[in-house]
C-alpha cells in the first residue's frame, strides 16, 4: 500500500544547531513529494516540493530537502534552527500517475531549546 | 490570488447533534477539494476528496459525509455526532491534479 513514514515523532534541538527530519515513502513509482509545517492550532503551510529534476530542493524559511531515489527518502534539513521553527512538520506524497490523493506522514514535532 | 476559507474556527457540539462545516475557495476554478481530520497527537487522515461538483470519494467509512454543491464549496456533515468525531478538521484544495495542496485554518471540533 502507498504510505509515507516519518520515523521520528518528537525531536528536540538547540537553537543554532542543524536539523534533519526524516521521511520515507512507499510507492510503485516516484511520487511528487512535499513538506508542510503546522504551528499550533493553525493550518498547514507548504515549505517545499519536489516534482522532478534537481534532487536538492530549496524552500521557504531556509529549509531544503533532498530526494534520494535509492533510499525512497525525502529528508528535510536546515543548517541552523531558530526558536520560531518549533512546530509540527509533515511530509506528504502524491502519486505521479494522475491520481489525486495527497497522503501525509504522521508528523514530527520539533522543539527548540534556547 | 487563491484563498481558502473554512468556518467555524471552533465548535463544541453535544453527542448526537448534527454537524456542518463549510469550506470555500476563491480565485481558482474547478479545484480538487479535500477534507482531512487530525486527531490530537496524530497525523492527518484523508476523509474525502472531490475532483468536481457532486463527485465525492470517501477514504474511510465513518459517521461523516461530504458534499460539493458548487464548484468551490465543500461541506462536511454528520447527522449524529459521536465523541470520536472530536478533532481538528482541515479543508484543502489543489489547482491541478498533481500540484501542492493549500490548507484552510482548520476547525477545532469538540464533541461533548
Image: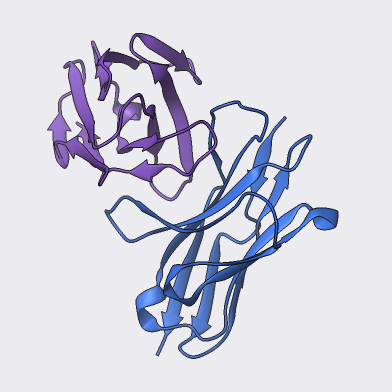
Chain colours: A blue, B purple
Say which of A84 and A49 sits in front: A49
State whether residue A99 is above or below residue B79.
Answer: below
Which is nearer the eye, A108 or A49? A49
- Residue A57 position within the rendered picture, expressed as x and y whole percent measured from the top left: 61, 65
Coordinates of residue B39 in the picture (x, y in percent): 39, 41
Residue at 57% across / 70% down in the picture?
Answer: A64
Q: Is residue A27 left or right of residue A113?
A: right
The answer to whether B69 appears left or right of A26 in the picture is left
User: Residue B18's x, y, as percent?
Assistant: 18, 16
- A83 displayed left or right of B6: right
- Quadrant for residue B91, please give it: top left
Q: Residue at the spot x=43%, y=26% of the render? A: B47
The residue most toward the right is A70
The quadrant of the image that shows the C terminus of chain B is: top left
Seen from the viewer's position, the closer of residues B17 and B50 is: B50
* In the image: residue B1, left or right of residue A1: left
Question: Which residue is found at the position 33% from the left and 61% from the top?
Answer: A39
The image position of residue A17, as x and y in percent, is 54, 88
From the viewer's perspective, is residue A42 above or below residue B66? Answer: below
The image shows a total of numbered marks equal to 0
Amino acid at each position: 500500500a502507498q504510505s509515507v513514514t516519518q520515523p521520528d515523532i518528537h525531536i528536540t534541538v538547540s537553537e543554532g544547531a542543524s536539523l534533519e527530519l526524516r521521511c520515507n515513502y512507499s510507492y510503485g513509482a516516484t511520487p511528487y513529494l512535499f513538506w508542510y509545517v503546522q504551528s499550533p492550532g493553525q493550518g498547514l503551510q507548504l515549505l517545499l516540493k519536489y516534482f522532478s529534476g534537481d534532487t536538492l530542493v530549496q524552500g521557504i524559511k531556509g529549509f531544503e530537502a533532498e530526494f534520494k531515489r535509492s533510499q525512497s527518502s525525502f529528508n528535510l534539513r536546515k543548517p541552523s534552527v531558530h526558536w520560531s521553527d518549533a512546530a509540527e512538520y509533515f511530509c506528504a506524497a502524491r502519486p505521479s500517475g494522475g491520481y489525486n490523493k495527497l497522503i501525509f506522514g504522521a508528523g514530527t514535532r520539533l522543539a527548540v531549546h534556547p | 490570488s487563491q484563498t481558502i476559507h473554512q468556518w467555524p474556527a471552533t465548535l463544541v457540539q453535544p453527542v448526537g447533534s448534527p454537524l456542518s462545516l463549510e469550506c470555500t475557495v476563491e480565485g481558482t476554478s474547478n479545484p480538487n477539494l479535500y477534507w482531512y481530520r487530525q486527531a490530537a497527537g496524530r497525523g492527518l487522515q484523508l476523509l474525502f476528496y472531490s475532483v468536481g461538483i457532486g463527485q465525492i470519494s470517501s477514504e474511510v467509512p465513518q459517521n461523516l459525509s461530504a458534499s460539493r454543491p458548487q464548484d468551490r464549496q465543500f461541506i462536511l456533515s454528520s447527522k449524529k455526532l459521536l465523541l470520536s468525531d472530536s478533532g481538528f478538521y482541515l479543508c484543502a484544495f489543489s489547482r491541478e491534479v498533481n500540484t501542492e495542496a493549500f490548507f484552510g485554518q482548520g476547525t477545532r471540533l469538540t464533541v461533548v
